[in-house]
Every structure is written in C-alpha cells, then in structure tokens.
Image: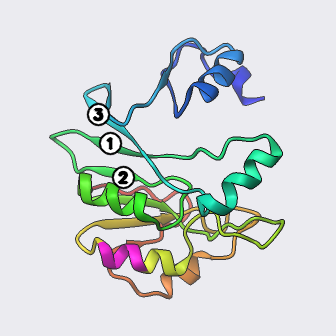
Amino acid sequence: MAANHIQKQIPFFVQSQTDKTIIEKYGFTNVCILSETGTLFAGITLYKTPCQHGRKKIVKPMCEKMGMPYDAMGIVFKNSAEKTLYVAGDTIWCEEVKHTLDTYKPQVVLINACGASLLVGNGERLIMHKQDVDELASYIPQAQIIASHMDTVSHLTVTRQDIRSLGLPNVHVPEDNEVLSF
C-alpha cells in the first residue's frame, strides 16, 4: 500500500472532515482541510472550489445509496509572482466551474477530459467530455487549457485524439511525461 511508503509528516490537503479522518487513520499527522476562503502554503494560496462530479441531481443520490460521498472539488493556486492555475478536478462543465473561472480568472486551467461515465445505470457522465472542453475553451479563450486524464481511465469515452481533433488553439493535450512551463 502506498500509504506505507510516504512520510507521515508531509503536508496532506483534503476537501472535508470525512477525508481528513480517513487519511489520519493511515498515520498522517499534517492533514489540512482546504478552505474556500484560501489556505496558505509555501507562499501560495490554495482555494477550494466547487464542482459537479457528474450531474449532482443524478449522481449524488446514487452515491448516497452506495454509502459513499458525492463530494469533489477543484483547486485554484494563486501567487502574485506566477500565473493563476485552476485544477478543475473531477467535474463536468457546470455553473460552479463557470463561477470559478469568473471569480479567479486563471491563466492556466487543467481539466480532466476523458468523459468518464458510470458503468451502471444510464452511463451518466462524471467528468468533462468533448463538448464540455469545447464550451470551456470558448468561455475562457485567453486561458491556456491543459486536457488530461485521456487514455488512462478504464471507463473513458474520450481519447487524446478526440480532444486534439477539436482543433482548439487554447487547448493542449500533453504526451505522457511531457513537462509544461508557464
């Protein structure tokens, strides 16, 4: 298990008290719940942002039925000497994401874009797919968008080539191990 090989004192950021309790059970001692009002770490302010891991009205009841939390989040990283980075997290294109873009105006946006869907029920989409990427790129054309998660998730419906085929000038699909600088 990976938790056995990680130093227990490292800073560990989570989204909720539930997650904090779980992580502390593995022996981690420096666990911090991220805040919507900002959490300062090493000169960078991290802002917890809302999102929808699939349409809330559809997926949340399914999660509750299975006894698991629906919660998901994004994170904005701000430092006056760097471009603002928004890691949207496991989310679909939704009002919460638009609000985050409007509020923080990030110059770099990292999205999970493999169109992962539920394997049960109606195949409800859990994270962004091609149309979501297209809408996001149109919504914030001045940002550099990095599309990730393709070709790595078993329940994907979108590949790297699918995103590249959109031909969006502000969307980059990195290769494995590619390093990006901004």
Q: Where is mark 2, residue-wise? A: 86
- The residue lying at 27 percent from left, 75 percent from top is 141
On screen, 79 above or below 115?
above
Question: Where is residue 9, by image quadrant?
Answer: top right
Tag 3: Cα neighbours inside 10 Å, few (<14), some, or many (≥20)?
A: some
Asked if the residue at tag 3 contacts the one at tag 1, i.e. Cβ–Cβ closer than 8 Å, the answer is yes
Viewer-nearest residue: 95 or 78: 95
- The residue lying at 74 percent from left, 49 percent from top is 63
Question: Where is residue 142, by image quadrant?
Answer: bottom left
Q: What is the C-alpha distance between the residues marked 3 and 2?
A: 12 Å
Name the N-terminal-most of marks 2 and 1: 1
Q: What is the C-alpha distance between the residues marked 2 and 1?
A: 6 Å
Tag shown at residue 77? 1
Q: What is the C-alpha distance between the residues marked 1 and 3?
A: 6 Å
Q: Where is mark 3, residue-wise? A: 45
Q: Hey, what amino acid is under mark 2?
A: Tyr
Which type of secondary structure does the marked residue at label 3 adopt?
Answer: strand
Residue 65 picture location, percent across and down: 81, 48
Residue 137 picture location, percent across and down: 36, 75
On screen, 159 above or below 167?
above
- The residue lying at 35 percent from left, 39 percent from top is 47
- Report the quarter where the C terminus lies: bottom left
Asked if the residue at tag 1 contacts the one at tag 2, i.e. Cβ–Cβ closer than 8 Å, the answer is yes
